[in-house]
Image (cartoon, rainbow, N blue to C red):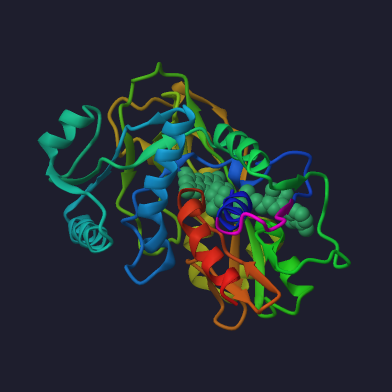
């Protein structure tokens, strides 16, 4: 997603340039970009000074416009973030302030209004309504982008892993999970490590429309991800998740340096139980029954950057570069939503060096 978006943006600005996308797989979207939740986020979680805050709102608008223009489906089902206790209300208010500071359209609504939007939502006093959150079909988007890129004169070479012997005037590395390894061959990313987190969703057998909107908890500040939530896919199916599990090796590494992550690790182990994850989701909506949730989806892997100096997970995009190459090291969620807007930023940097 990021590679194709950047390639198209560069070709748009420099019509005569020869732009080549190399992809080690036989098709586009075989990793995060074709295996994500397909949510176009609105942009209210991120601190206003972050790159994510800058690109999510505009990326959402650009991607929506793209899907409409290409006749690709968009489910404009919105999103509710619901408070479940008095304790969560100040955090919900903070989320709302943050969203407004980021220029995102949001409404703070009461429980009655929230239940008009989603009758099954369990709401303690207040909820945030985000009308601009929607869902798309990530694979359909990837296929359309490949077609457009080729039509615009971009060469795409599949089954072509990067080799250090390859020559180019400028190289842009958007290799997702492979980004750190590739950057190292240019002398970058020395103090980073890539930690893959495996994400799974559990699908409901309930009919379309059984839940009308994406339904999220107020995020737990102890954990880096958004918490178990309901997503409505572009085709109206309901799923809960995600899990976020590192490999045993990476998990051990994180726990050795961060004993405070023990709670997160335990939670992730528990979430692989169908019964447990359904129970976690059932605090958000009425009538959630474990027997309706029987099918795990295809896993997607988050390429999460870890800074060995600060011993922290990087939560924003990270770019390292010089005049010959630019390396996108942390295209974390919501990288899919951000991609078209983020590509403008990358093109600004790459073309003005
Ligand atoms: C489970 C999950 C759910 C998510 N949900 C959402 C969501 O709802 N909304 C949202 O906005 N974002 C979401 N994200 C995040 C989003 O999917 C990513 O931020 C985005 O897809 C990153 O795009 P990318 O192009 O950097 O990575 P990728 O799609 O991983 O692309 C990198 C590409 O580089 C190729 N590559 C790697 N190494 C080499 C090499 N050496 N040579 C040649 N090619 C190479 C790979 O084959 C791959 O195709 C989610 C992610 C996951 C995992």
As rendered, which of 166 and 252 lies closer to the eye? 166
Give the left or right position of residue 36, taking residue 105 as reference: right
Kindly identify the residue that appears in the image at 31 percent across and 25 percent down: 287
The reply to whether the magenta stretch includes residue 19 is yes
Residue 60 visible? The answer is yes
As rendered, which of 81 and 278 lies closer to the eye? 81
Q: Main secondary structure of the magenta part?
A: loop
As rendered, which of 168 and 320 lies closer to the eye? 168
In the image, residue 314 sits, relative to residue 64, either above or below, namely below
Residue 170 falls in image quadrant: bottom right
Q: Residue furthest bottom?
A: 309
Percent x, y of residue 351:
59, 69
In the image, residue 14 sits, relative to residue 205, either above or below, namely below
As rendered, which of 198 and 150 lies closer to the eye? 150
Q: What are the residue bounds of the magenta stretch?
A: 13-21
Q: Residue furthest right?
A: 165
Percent x, y of residue 94:
22, 62
Give the left or right position of residue 242, taking residue 287 as reference: right
Residue 265 falls in image quadrant: bottom right
Kindly identify the residue that appears in the image at 24 percent across and 60 percent down: 91
Kindly identify the residue that appears in the image at 72 percent across and 60 percent down: 178
The reply to whether the magenta stretch includes residue 72 is no
**Total residue callouts:** 0
Residue 66 falls in image quadrant: top left
Percent x, y of residue 198:
61, 49
Percent x, y of residue 218:
30, 52
């Amino acid at each position: 997603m990021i590679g194709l978006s950047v390639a198209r943006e560069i070709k748009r600005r420099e019509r005569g340039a020869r732009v080549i996308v190399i992809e080690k797989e036989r098709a586009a979207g075989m990793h995060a970009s074709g295996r994500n939740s397909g949510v176009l986020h609105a942009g209210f979680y991120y601190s206003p000074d972050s790159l994510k805050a800058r690109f999510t709102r505009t990326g959402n608008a650009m991607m929506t416009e793209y899907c409409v223009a290409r006749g690709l489906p968009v489910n404009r089902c919105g999103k509710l973030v619901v408070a479940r206790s008095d304790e969560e209300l100040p955090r919900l208010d903070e989320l709302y302030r943050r969203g407004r500071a980021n220029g995102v359209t949001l409404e703070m609504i009461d429980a009655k209004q929230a239940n008009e939007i989603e009758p099954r939502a369990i709401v303690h006093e207040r909820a945030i309504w985000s009308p601009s959150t929607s869902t798309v079909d990530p694979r359909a988007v990837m296929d359309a982008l490949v077609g457009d890129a080729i039509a615009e004169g971009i060469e795409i070479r599949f089954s072509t892993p990067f080799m250090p012997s390859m020559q180019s005037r400028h190289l842009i590395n958007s290799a997702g999970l492979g980004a750190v390894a590739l950057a190292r061959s240019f002398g970058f990313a020395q103090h980073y490590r890539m930690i893959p987190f495996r994400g799974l969703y559990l699908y409901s057998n309930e009919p379309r429309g059984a839940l009308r909107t994406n339904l999220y908890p107020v995020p737990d500040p102890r954990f880096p991800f958004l918490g178990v939530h309901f997503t409505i896919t572009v085709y109206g199916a309901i799923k809960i998740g995600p899990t976020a599990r590192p490999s045993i090796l990476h998990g051990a590494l994180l726990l050795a340096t961060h004993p405070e992550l023990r709670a997160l690790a335990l939670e992730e182990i528990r979430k692989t139980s169908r019964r447990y994850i359904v129970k976690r989701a059932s605090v958000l909506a009425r009538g959630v029954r474990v027997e309706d949730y029987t099918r795990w989806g295809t896993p997607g892997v988050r390429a999460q950057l870890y800074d060995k100096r600060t011993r922290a997970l990087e939560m924003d995009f990270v770019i390292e570069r010089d005049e010959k190459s630019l390396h996108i090291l942390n295209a974390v969620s919501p990288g899919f939503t951000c991609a078209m807007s983020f590509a403008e930023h990358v093109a600004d940097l790459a073309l003005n060096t």
